Amino acid sequence: MNHPQPDTLIRNPNGNPITASVEIRASASRVWAVAGEFAGFDRFIPALERIEMTGQGPGSLRKKFFKDGNLVVEQLNHRDEQAMTMTWTTLYNTLGVGQLWAAMVVEAAGADCSRATWTIIAEPTQGEAEADAFAQFVQGFADEAMGNLRTLF
């Protein structure tokens, strides 16, 4: 008799990192208070209707409800207040994303100035044929979000 073995659908994606980085005229701690708030991405992503959280800290789940009806569920993997870094993984989505890992980092860049960088490694569900269009979509989405983040300061 064959007994089930431990398995998982969660794996890190392969691919080139996509980064969106902005310099912001505010202290790193002020920027981290917004960009580092896992439950607060709706502040700089206008396509989001609302975010619902389950739990707190690493392992917590974020459900992002988009105004167009799409849904993304993500798990916070790591968060470091002192280093101002966090990472997360997409567990479920209706956007055509196969696997997705992301990081947000905020660094000081001089007096009352900082740099926020969102890094995404993602795979489309459709496969290689759609990879270029998918990468352009992800890059455009991240660039717009980070531009919106900058306007909050």
Image (cartoon, rainbow, N blue to C red):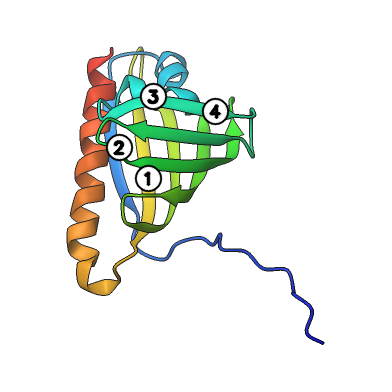
Which comes sooner in the sequence, label 4 or label 2?
4
Which residue is painted at 51% across and 34% down in the image?
A: 62
Which comes sooner in the sequence, label 3 or label 2?
3
Residue 100's x, y, as percent?
42, 53
Secondary structure under tag 2 reads loop
Q: Amino acid at mark 4?
A: Met
Q: Which residue in the structure is indicated by mark 1?
A: 119
Tell me the quarter of the image containing the N terminus: bottom right
How many angstroms separate mark 1 from mark 4 (CA)?
Answer: 22 Å
Which comes sooner in the sequence, label 1 or label 4?
4
> What is the number of the mark on residue 50?
3
Judge whether residue 86 can be spotted in this image.
yes
Horizontal side of 85 relative to 67 (left or right) equals: right
Q: Where is residue 128, by image quadrant?
A: bottom left
Tag 4–tag 3 contact (CB < 8 Å): no
How many angstroms separate mark 3 from mark 1 (CA)?
Answer: 22 Å
Answer above or below: position of 9 versus 57. Answer: below
Q: Amino acid at mark 2?
A: Gly
Secondary structure under tag 1 reads strand
Tag 3–tag 2 contact (CB < 8 Å): no
Numbered disc in front, either 1 or 4: 4
Residue 101's x, y, as percent?
45, 51
> What is the number of the mark on residue 53?
4
Which comes sooner in the sequence, label 3 or label 1?
3
Residue 78's x, y, as percent?
59, 40
Q: Which residue in the structure is indicated by mark 2?
A: 69
Q: Amino acid at mark 1?
A: Thr
Could you classify mark 2 by the number of other residues whose Cα lies within 10 Å: few (under 14), some (14-19), or many (20 or more)?
Answer: few
How many angstroms separate mark 3 from mark 2 (CA)?
Answer: 11 Å
